[in-house]
Amino acid sequence: MKPKHQRLLLALTAVIGLLVASLIAINALSDEASYFYTPATLHDQDVAIGKAIRLGGMVKQGSISSARDGVTINFIVQDKDQQQMVRYTGVTPNLFVEGSGVVADGRLDQNGVFIADTLLAKHDENYVPRELQDIDMRDAQNLEKSVVQ
């Protein structure tokens, strides 16, 4: 085989190897990606049970309750249109309170409850996630009242 053909074969092999490595990396990263959902988008889209996602919204007033084990809490995350029940086991951030913004990483279980692995609370009075900036919590509270009646 001529040296020219050997170099061409080597270059072709290198390009194919890079393509295969890129496809493997993209596939691995897409399986670990965590997509951001609000309660409304979570209910509108068919999210697979057990898929890693990130849920963001406001903690509903009066929704935080502790389980008997003392480390598990249940609460509701809401946006303008929907609400989502969340369960978290662990120590909550100091700024995690009712009526504040929260972002939770976790998965949906078979019962439709979001099981959070981590909680992130807002860091100051002006913080609101970019996706929730146009939400007026008074609208969400009025929605709650109309649903109850």
Image (spheres, rainbow, N blue to C red):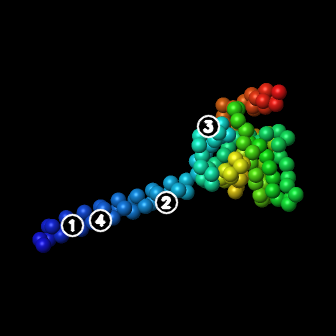
Q: Say whether residue 10 is left or right of residue 50.
A: left
Residue at x-position 49% and y-position 60%: 28
N-term mark: 1 or 2? 1
Position above or below: 147 against 43: above
**What's the residue type where badge 4 is placed?**
Ala
Disc 3: CA contacts within 10 A as few (<14), some (14-19) or many (>=20):
few
Q: Say whether residue 117 is left or right of residue 63.
A: left
Which of pointers 1 and 2 indicates the residue nearer the eye? 2
Mark 3 — residue?
44
Mark 2 — residue?
28
Mark 1 — residue?
9
Pointers 3 and 4 in contact (C-beta within 8 Å): no
Pointers 2 and 3 in contact (C-beta within 8 Å): no
Q: Position of residue 108 (x, y in %)?
A: 67, 50
- Kindly state the secondary structure of the residue where label 4 is placed: helix
**Label at residue 128:** none
Q: Position of residue 27 (x, y in %)?
A: 46, 57
Outermost residue on the left side: it is 2
Residue at x-position 82% and y-position 43%: 63
N-term mark: 3 or 4? 4
Position above or below: 131 against 109: above
**Label at residue 14:** 4
Whole-angstrom CA distance, mark 1 to mark 2, is 29 Å
* Figure quadrant of the C terminus: top right
User: For the image shown, how many numbered marks are present on the structure?
Assistant: 4
Q: Nearer the viewer, residue 7 or 30?
A: 30
- Kindly state the secondary structure of the residue where label 2 is placed: helix
Disc 1: CA contacts within 10 A as few (<14), some (14-19) or many (>=20):
few
Which of pointers 2 and 4 indicates the residue nearer the eye? 2
N-term mark: 3 or 1? 1
Residue at x-position 75% and y-position 45%: 85
Which of pointers 2 and 3 indicates the residue nearer the eye? 3
